[in-house]
Image (cartoon, rainbow, N blue to C red):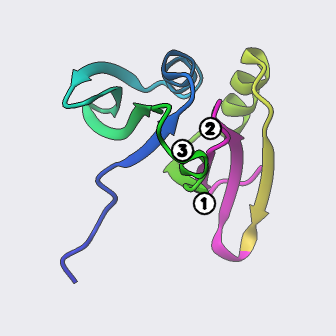
């Protein structure tokens, strides 16, 4: 099968600056703003790779376009450090233990309600 990884995800944001600040300040993404091509948006970067494309939602868009994306997952390390960081910056989170998969998850929501699942493989809470 030629498919082997997620290239990027697009989020229609109700507040571009707030969404970019969440991904930058809370999750450590780099932000590269972009304009033109008929929209305003930003690329959110991990290790220099554009992973999340955030687009400022236009007034003429259907209201159900935000929230269509249920979640995306990121591999993560350091469960206690992530808990402390999220608590410090005031971002609510919930946790799921999936011992059958040797997986622990911390789940947060971005400002537009998109779930971001942080997956800690082979790490116990």
Q: Residue at x 65, y 30 (%)?
A: 111
Nearer to us: label 3 or label 1: 3
Q: Residue at x 53, y 50 (%)?
A: 65
Q: What x and y, as percent, mark residue 1?
A: 22, 84
Magenta residue span: 100-125
Q: Which residue is mark 3?
A: 76
Q: Label 1 neighbourhood size at 10 Å, few (<14), some (14-19), many (20+)?
A: few
Q: Which residue is mark 1?
A: 122
In this rendered view, identify the residue nearer to me: 54 or 92: 54
Q: Label 2 neighbourhood size at 10 Å, few (<14), some (14-19), many (20+)?
A: few
Q: Are marks 2 and 3 in contact (CB under 8 Å)?
A: yes
Q: What x and y, as percent, mark residue 87?
A: 79, 23
- The alpha-carbon separation of the residues under discs 2 and 1 comes to 11 Å
Q: Which residue is mark 2?
A: 78
Q: Are marks 2 and 1 in contact (CB under 8 Å)?
A: no
Question: Which callout, 3 or 1, points at the residue further toward the start of the chain?
Answer: 3
Q: Quadrant of residue 76?
A: top right
Question: Which callout, 2 or 1, points at the residue further toward the start of the chain?
Answer: 2
- Tag count in the figure? 3
Q: Is residue 74 above or below residue 55?
A: below
Instruction: Please tell me whether mark 1 sits on a helix, a strand or a loop.
Output: loop
Instruction: Please tell me whether mark 2 sits on a helix, a strand or a loop.
Output: loop
């Amino acid at each position: 099968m030629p498919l082997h990884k997620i290239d990027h995800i697009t989020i229609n944001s109700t507040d571009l600056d707030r969404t970019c600040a969440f991904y930058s300040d809370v999750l450590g993404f780099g932000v590269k703003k972009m304009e033109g091509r008929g929209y305003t948006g930003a690329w959110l970067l991990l290790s220099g790779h554009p992973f999340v494309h955030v687009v400022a939602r236009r007034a003429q868009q259907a209201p159900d376009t935000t929230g269509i994306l249920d979640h995306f997952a990121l591999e993560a390390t350091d469960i206690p450090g992530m808990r402390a960081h999220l608590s410090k910056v005031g971002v609510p989170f919930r946790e799921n233990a999936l011992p059958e998969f040797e997986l622990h998850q911390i789940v947060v929501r971005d400002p537009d309600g998109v779930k971001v699942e942080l997956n800690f493989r082979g790490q116990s809470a």
